[in-house]
Structure formats: structure tokens, C-alpha cells
Amino acid sequence: MSGAAKRTELDEVRRAVAAFVAAGADESVQRVVTAVHGLSRRLNQWYDHQLSDLGISAGEWAVLGELARSENWTPLTPSQLAAAANVAPSSMTHRLDGMVQRDLITRMPDPSNRTRVLVELTDAGYQLYVAAIRDADLVESDVLGSLSEDQVHQLAGLLEQVIAGLDKADL
């Protein structure tokens, strides 16, 4: 059995940054980007486990989230949901079939265009959405637990500023 200690996430970030810097990257940039990537990866692993525990897939979560965030719970078309989830419309149709069977969503004819279908969140779908958000909020709060409230607000502001820059950049 190896006597080597298990590497922490911070060790992995530092190793990656050192490799990027050795290859010519800017250390400050790589410290931020690599840390954000590592945090995102770890949270996504937890989210995947959480969704599995709740009995839904990441794709179904995307549908629930899109519908829950729609203005005034406005029903959306399968095409809108497919575009938001970045999947083919045929894949979305299959996903929606399963969600209807589990009473998470309903489909109804569009009153303004009878050739179109609208998708709406059910009470059960919304309750599942709320449960997932509340569970995630507990873990996310723990992740930020080593920061003061002021540091959390400062970090949020800085990250929002970076995201606004992404919106302006042509990436």
C-alpha cells in the first residue's frame, strides 16, 4: 500500500496552475480560472448525486429549472426547452414524455396556435424543484462557510463582473 497522502482539491489546483504557468500562462489568471473550474466541477459532482437521490436526471432538472424560472410561470414550447437545454427537439420530446408520466409537467395545446404544444410545471414538479434548491443551498452555504458575509458579497460582485465581461466578449 502506498504511503502517499491523498491530494486535496487545493493541491490539484496548485499542481494544475504550476503546469499552466510552466507552459507560459499568466499565474494570476490561472489561479482564478483553475479554482473556479475546480469548484464548478466539484459542485457539479454533488449536484449529479443530489439529482440522482431525487430521482431525476440533469436533463430533467434543466426542464424543471427553465419552467420554474420562466416569467410568471409562463408555459414554454418543447422547442424552447430543447434550445435552452441545448438538445435536439426529438430528445426533448422523449424527456418530456417521462416527465409527464411522473406528473412533473403537463402538456397542453397552445390556445393561440393549435399546432403547437405548451409545457407547464405541475405542483409536484415545482415541489421537486424547491426541494432540490433548498438542498443545494445548504451545501453551497457550507462551501462558502469559510468566508465572511462581506467576503461572500465581494466574491459575488467580482464573479458577476467577470460574467458581464463574458457577455461583452466575443468568445
Image (spheres, helix red, strand yellow):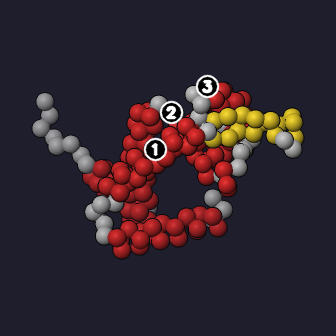
Q: Earlier in the sequence, mark 1 or mark 3?
A: 3
Mark 2 surroundings within 10 Å by alpha-carbon count, few (fewer than 14), some (14 through 19), many (20 or more) = some
**62 versus 139 height, above or below:** above
Q: Which mark is residue 132?
A: 1
Count numbered badges in the picture: 3
Secondary structure category for the residue under label 1: helix
- What is the x, y in percent for residue 14? 31, 56
Q: Earlier in the sequence, mark 2 or mark 1?
A: 2
Hey, what amino acid is under mark 1?
Ala
Does the image show residue 41? no
Mark 1 surroundings within 10 Å by alpha-carbon count, few (fewer than 14), some (14 through 19), many (20 or more) = some
Whether residue 30 sits left or right of residue 76 in the image: it is left
- What is the x, y in percent for residue 162? 52, 67
Foreground residue among 46 and 15:
46
Instruction: Measure the C-alpha gap from mark 2 to mark 3.
Output: 13 Å
Q: Quadrant of the N terminus?
A: top left
Instruction: Measure the C-alpha gap from mark 2 to mark 1.
Output: 10 Å
Foreground residue among 74 and 40:
74
Q: Which mark is residue 162?
A: none
**108 versus 140 height, above or below:** above
